[in-house]
Structures are given as C-alpha cells and as structure tokens.
Amino acid sequence: MNVTHMKYALEISRQGSLNKAAEALFIAQPNLSRAIKELEGELGVSLFVRSGKGMEPTPEGAIFLEYAEKILKKMDEVADLFKAESQSLQRFSLCGPRSSYISAAFARFCASFSSGTSEVYYKETNSRETLKSVLDTDYKLGIIRYSEKFDSYFQGYLFEKKLVADVIARFSFKIVMSKDSPLAGKEVISKDDLTGLMEVAYSDLFVPSLPLAEVKKADLQGRADRCVFIYERASQLEILSENADSFMWSAPLPAKTLDRYGLIQKEYADNDMIYKDVLIYRNDHFLTELDNLFLKELEKSKEECL
C-alpha cells in the first residue's frame, strides 16, 4: 500500500467516475484502473462497485477511504509543520582551527543576530577533522590551516573532494608568552633564546598524502626539550599565563586576548614560513545569509589581528 494509491481511491470517490478521476489526476484510465486493482488485491477487499450513479464505495471501501483521508491529512500537517520550521529556522555550522581571531569573529557574529530561530554550531579542531566534518557530516563551513609549503598537497586533495577553497588569511607564526617571561624585554626572539623553556603546543599535524614524519620534519619550530601538548585553546592560554618559562607558536592573537591572559607576542628572528587559513565548503552548498554575516565579522577580526 502506498500514498499514491490512497490518493487515487479518494479521487475516484470524489468524482464518482473512473474516467473523470483519471482526467483530474492526469493519468491514463487503464493505469488508474490497474492501480486500484493492485490496492484491492493487497487489501483483500473490493473498494468500489459500479452502479447507475457511477463508481460507489463498498462498505469496506467506505471504511478504507475514511482512514485514507485521515492519514493523508496528518501527512500534510506534518509536511506543513516541518516546512514552516525549515523556512524560519536559520542554521550555521563551522569547524576551524583553535585560533583566537576566528573565535573573536564568531563571538561578534553570535551577538549580531537576534531575530528569528537559529541553530549555530562551532567546533575547534584540526584540519583532518575539519575536512571530515565538512565532507561526511552536516557541518557546512570549515577553515583549515597549513604551511604554504604544503599548498600542492592540500589543493590537490580539495580539488579531488570537490570542495570550494578560498584563502582568507596568510600570516607568520609569532611566539606568545607571559608578560613575566624572561624574554619579555626582547623585541625579536631567536632559536637560542628558547633553550630551556617549556613549549605549549598542539600535536595534531596533518597533510594529505604525506607521512606524519615528513610533516614534523618540515614543521617550523621542531619541538622544545620540554613540551606540553594541549588540545583545548583556553587551557593552553592559561598555562602560558601561569608559567613564565613557557611559550607557544601561534597565529597573531587579538589584543583583548593577550590582555585577558596577561600575555605578549614577539617576532621570531628566523621565521620565513607562511601559513594559510583556507575557507572550505562543498560545491553544492550556497552561502547563506548567516554564512556571509560570519565571513563579514571574520574579515574585520582578521584586519585587526593579522
């Protein structure tokens, strides 16, 4: 039994004629007749009988039509309910790197819309998980970060996966530390200056089709003798704030973030590596009003920080 057969039976009852029902349904009369016979065979009863007045429901047919009408009405109500909800509900979803300039843009974005119903999702993670979330789950936007020297690996992968990719930022990492750091008085930090200090870092490097060992070898900073790996940005900033002998490599941070945690950021003397933040989304996704609103705030935040 299917919904179409129910609609056919109800139309025959309304029209009182097989021919008139076929015309109203824009189908051939033999096809309509065949569909009703299939329905009757499935139910094991006759639904209509011919009379001088045309096609009339049998007693069993009258019961079936009563239920069919109720079922179709409920289906229409459900469809209208979710159609109305989908029209009024605004959805936004973003995966991106653990980056203060992006989170600052997201915070202002959340404060910029207040009318209507909305669902907003924001996940800070690494490039591998961002790609997976955009490709395999319901996250619409992603931002991936990688060294420019790996551009060919990422561009090839993005093209293969049919992802739209737009560069939103290019920058060099800075060294972030506590205001009480022994290096606070230096304008530019050298590699030797970092000897003996504790590095706070993320340990989730990823480049498509390239072994992790090769990625680590090409990593800007290598690793300090003492290294603490953190996977949550706020904890990382707290550790830097509380440990004067610690440092981290980071994209430039907003002044508000630095002030909030009592941090400073310095240039690195031998820093010739450029990093990219790239916006990605599936090629069948069209940027929504909320998407564009976020990107507007992101551009402002980037100008302030980078």
Image (cartoon, rainbow, N blue to C red):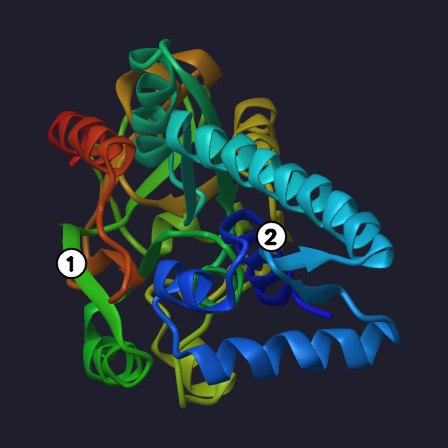
Mark 2 in CB contact with mark 1 (< 8 angstroms): no
Where in the figure is residue 151, as x and y percent of width and height? 20, 76
Which residue is more in the foreground, 52 or 159? 52
Residue at (40% x, 37% y) in the render: 92
Where in the figure is residue 210, as x and y percent of width and height? 41, 88
Q: Quarter holding the N terminus? A: bottom right
Residue 127 seen: no
| Amino acid type, callout 2 | Ser
Where in the figure is residue 199, as x and y percent of width and height? 53, 49
Residue at (49% x, 82% y) in the render: 31
Marked residue nearer the N-terminal end (2 or 1):
2
Element type where label 1 sits in the image: strand
| Amino acid type, callout 1 | Asp
In the rendered view, would you say 16 is above or below 29?
Answer: above
On screen, residue 137 versus residue 230, left or right, reads left
Distance from disc 2 to disc 1, alpha carbons, whole Å, reads 58 Å
- Nearest to viewer (mark 2 / mark 1): 2
**Which of the labelled discs sits on residue 210, or is there none?**
none
Residue at (44% x, 78% y) in the render: 29
Where in the figure is residue 40, as x and y percent of width and height? 77, 75
Which residue is more in the foreground, 248 or 86? 86
Residue 291 seen: yes
Which residue is more in the foreground, 15 or 205? 15
Q: Quarter holding the C terminus? A: top left
**Which of the labelled discs sits on residue 166, or is there none?**
1
On screen, residue 145 versus residue 13, left or right, reads left
Which residue is more in the foreground, 107 or 89? 89
Callout 1: 10 Å neighbours few (<14), some, many (20+)?
few
On screen, residue 88 versus residue 15, left or right, reads left
In the rendered view, would you say 30 is above or below 149?
Answer: below
Element type where label 2 sits in the image: helix
List the residue tagged with mark 2.
13
